[in-house]
Image: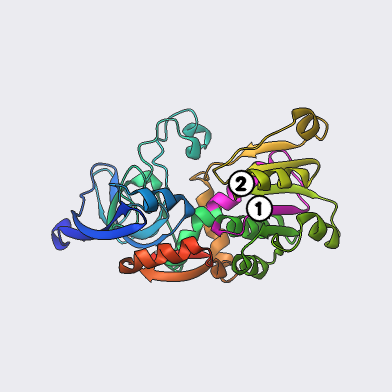
């Protein structure tokens, strides 16, 4: 498709602040050298969008995008018509972290799509070719968004834990939001049929966790300690916090076996440690986990093709771009899994 065949203007949402979304027009961008023009077909809502929704932004948000290559700039190899997903971080590919396959920790990032550059709520976006991952045409683009924050971020957190606890026989997740559901699902896919407990106060999301084979822990009426014991467990090898809450992190840390690993995925509050008691005497480990590596997409692509029916329940709501306001209001009320905007 040539640029001349496209309308020059596109309708985009404008996040004006105070939880309000309006609409305006922008010119469809042209891809430069090494860039692709993506016709966005799906983008998933994320809790990380909350600041933009509440405070406004000049950037078009959306950092979990899937779409089709509409035009390719000079020096690119991706064919027009290819479908795929967009990796959030515009990694450079040449810094010491990138050459060590740590693209999520690039030292010279060129973009954070949806934050520094227009993202997936625009009908068309330009991205550097190296962040586009081509997916099989048999994988619907709405479901392909799960390769990003759901499978990518979830799987990376588990692999971080495996660096210190190679054999994981039981696990617990704090928070049954979309990331927590992704972590729970990836535990089942990567670690096998081990016990996975998921804690939250939201009954709707805990029911989703149960559909994925996890053991739900409703903290409004039961404690993690009691459910752990009733499940025949004496603790966990791996705990993953997706809530970002200090209290949840402390509960997760105390629930670990000796040794054990706590992986922090959710941004937010603090973790206060008594080093002798919490780390030295127990040989427990606390790790951070930032997004995931671009290189992880290939293995996760094979997983989603094999286990698509299992993963599908994580997506609970689908809306059009014109319903973005409604989608965010429902999403932030909490009774959803992953919410997708389809174009």
Q: Secondary structure at mark 2?
A: loop
Q: Residue 174 bears which disc, if any?
A: 1
Q: Position of residue 247 (x, y in %)?
A: 67, 46
Q: Quadrant of residue 218?
A: bottom right
Residue drawn where x is 36% and y is 48% of the image: 55
Neighbourhood count class around disc 1 (C-alpha, 10 Å): few under 14, some 14–19, many 20 upward: many
Residue at the spot 86% in from the left edge and 60% down from the top edge: 232
| Color theme of the render | rainbow
Left or right of 92, for residue 211: right
Is tag 2's residue or tag 1's residue first in the polypeptide sequence? 1
Q: Secondary structure at mark 1?
A: strand
Q: Is residue 141 visible?
A: no
Front one among 108 and 314:
314
Task: Give the side of residue 149 with respect to residue 19, left or right.
Answer: right
Indicate the position of residue 155 as horizontal and vertical percent values: 60, 51
CA gap between label 2 and label 1 equals 9 Å
Crowd around label 2: few <14 · some 14–19 · many ≥20 (10 Å):
some
The x, y position of residue 313, in whole percent, is 56, 70
Of discs 2 and 1, which sits in the foreground?
Answer: 2
Residue 175 forms part of the magenta stretch: yes
Residue 114 placement, left or right of 225: left
Q: How many marks?
A: 2
At horizontal 38% and vertical 67% (from top left) the residue drawn is 326
Q: Say the numbered circle drawn on residue 245.
A: 2
Q: Is residue 310 magenta?
A: no
Is 232 displayed left or right of 50 in the figure? right
- The quarter of the rendered structure image containing the C terminus is bottom left
Observer-nearest residue: 111 or 198? 198
Cβ–Cβ under 8 Å for marks 2 and 1 = yes
Q: Which residues are magenta?
A: 152-178
Q: Which image quarter is the N terminus in?
A: bottom left
Give the image location of residue 188, x and y in percent: 68, 60
């Amino acid at each position: 498709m040539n640029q001349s065949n496209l309308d020059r203007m596109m309708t985009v949402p404008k996040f004006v602040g105070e939880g309000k979304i309006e609409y305006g027009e922008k010119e469809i961008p042209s891809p430069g050298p090494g860039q692709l023009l993506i016709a966005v077909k799906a983008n998933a809502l994320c809790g990380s969008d909350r600041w933009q929704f509440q405070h406004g932004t000049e950037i078009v948000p959306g950092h979990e995008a899937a779409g089709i290559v509409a035009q390719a700039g000079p020096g690119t190899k991706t064919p027009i018509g290819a479908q795929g997903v967009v990796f959030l971080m515009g990694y450079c590919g040449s810094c010491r972290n990138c050459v060590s396959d740590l693209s999520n920790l690039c030292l010279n990032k060129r973009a954070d799509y949806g934050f520094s550059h227009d993202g997936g709520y625009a009908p068309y976006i330009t991205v550097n070719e190296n962040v586009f991952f081509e997916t099989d045409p048999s994988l619907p683009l709405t479901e392909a968004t799960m390769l990003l924050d759901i499978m990518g971020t979830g799987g990376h957190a588990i692999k971080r834990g495996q660096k210190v606890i190679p054999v994981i026989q039981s696990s617990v997740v704090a928070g049954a939001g979309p990331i927590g559901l992704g972590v729970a699902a990836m535990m089942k896919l990567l670690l096998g049929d081990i016990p996975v407990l998921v804690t939250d106060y939201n009954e709707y999301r805990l029911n989703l966790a149960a559909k994925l084979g996890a053991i739900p822990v409703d903290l409004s009426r039961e404690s993690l300690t009691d459910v752990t014991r009733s499940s025949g467990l004496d603790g966990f090898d791996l705990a993953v916090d997706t809530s970002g809450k200090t209290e949840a992190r402390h509960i997760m840390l105390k629930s670990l076996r000796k040794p054990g690993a706590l992986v922090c995925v959710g941004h937010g509050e603090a973790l206060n440690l008594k080093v002798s008691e919490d780390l030295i005497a127990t040989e427990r480990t606390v790790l951070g986990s930032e997004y995931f590596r671009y290189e992880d997409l290939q293995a996760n692509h094979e997983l989603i093709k094999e286990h698509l029916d299992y993963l599908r329940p994580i997506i609970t709501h689908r809306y059009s771009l014109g319903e973005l306001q409604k989608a965010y209001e429902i999403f932030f009320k909490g009774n959803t899994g992953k919410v997708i905007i389809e174009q």
